Image (spheres, rainbow, N blue to C red):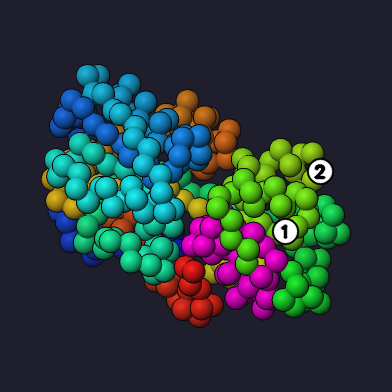
Amino acid sequence: MNKPSLHKLSAVALLTGAMAMSIAPAPVSAQKAPFENATMMVGFSAGGGTDTTTRTVANQVGLDNEGLAIAVLNRPGAGGVVAQQSLLTAPKDGSTIMLTSVGPLTVLPHLSKVGFDVKQDFVPISMAVNFPNILVVPSSLGVKTFDEFIEYAKKNPGKVNYGSSGIGAASHMAGEMLNQRAGIDMLHIPYKGGAPAMNDLITGRVDAYFGVPSSVKPHIESGALIPIASSGETRSIHYPDIPALGELYPGFNATNWYAFIGPAGMPPETVQWWNQAIVKALKNPDVQERLSKVGLDIETSTPEELARIIDSESQMWSAIIQERGIKLN
């Protein structure tokens, strides 16, 4: 259930035509936008990673397409689910799309009745960013490496805990995957957001946390937190000196990613136009620099590739949720 690489996905998509929808094959990057006004929704509050990504991309797409005005609409709630529910009633002309994340696409549908079917109700457009979270521990815990942490956890079964920004969040699921793969039993403590979890981590009330690179960076630099591993298959470009959990446990991949989707029923040529426009924007050096500064690693895809990533990760998280007995309440 490993997340397939985009190179493999591309080859498979070309050979099998994996997506049911038909995508116009002709280059469309030079085509005029199919509308004069567009909206990009985002399922989280202003100021976070998803909001920064959405606003940065929306601005660049607008600059690349003269005469196109793009509004950004924040609709936070239920870990991104509220915005995806809103997308169900968006115009089918493709003038409204949204940036969503791994949680509401692949995790939360297995934990509650979200009111939508990811495969039937949405159309994938492009991956935007994909980055590993950083496993950090407070300096007061007395461990400095990942091996020391695992040894400590095994000597104290049921006594070591880890915090998350909420049930079903990337930080939660990474911790459960670590429990599963490392054979340890960390107690999960869910918070209402990353900030309160970080506060308790720094004060030592929480023993570990998988944090977004930009949020843990100042506390690592101050010496309050120690980074011991990253949650992807390969090492974080921001913390290359700590091991990736995929190195230690083959197949471990619990990255945090954001992707653009639209409402089902969008014209295929409009899906392709958005894909080309978003990919072009994400390849702009100014966009890359801005997102990199806040720890967001750009990764683009075709609609077909994104569809297969969503399906693969949905199956992976469903299995872990069932095995670990994870429940929303």
Question: Tag 2's secondary structure?
Answer: loop
Residue pushed farthest front? 329
* Residue name at image x 20 percent, y 44 percent: 90
**Residue 9 seen from this side:** no
Horizontal relation, residue 177 to residue 86: left or right: right
**Residue 58 seen from this side:** yes
Check residue 206 in the rendering and tell me which mark sits there, or answer none.
1
Total residue callouts: 2
- Highlighted range, magenta: 161-187
Note whether 207 is above or below 158 in the view shown.
above
The picture places residue 101, in percent across and down from the top left corner, at 42, 51
The picture places residue 193, in percent across and down from the top left corner, at 56, 50
Nearer to me, 213 or 121: 121
Q: Which residue is mark 2?
A: 223
Label 1: how many Cα within 10 Å (few below 14, some 14–19, many 20+): many
Horizontal relation, residue 304 to residue 218: left or right: left
* Residue name at image x 31 percent, y 51 percent: 84
Q: Callout 2, which amino acid?
A: Gly
- Membership of 237 in magenta stretch: no
Horizontal relation, residue 163 to residue 227: left or right: left
Nearer to me, 65 or 97: 97
Sequence-first tag of 2 and 1:
1
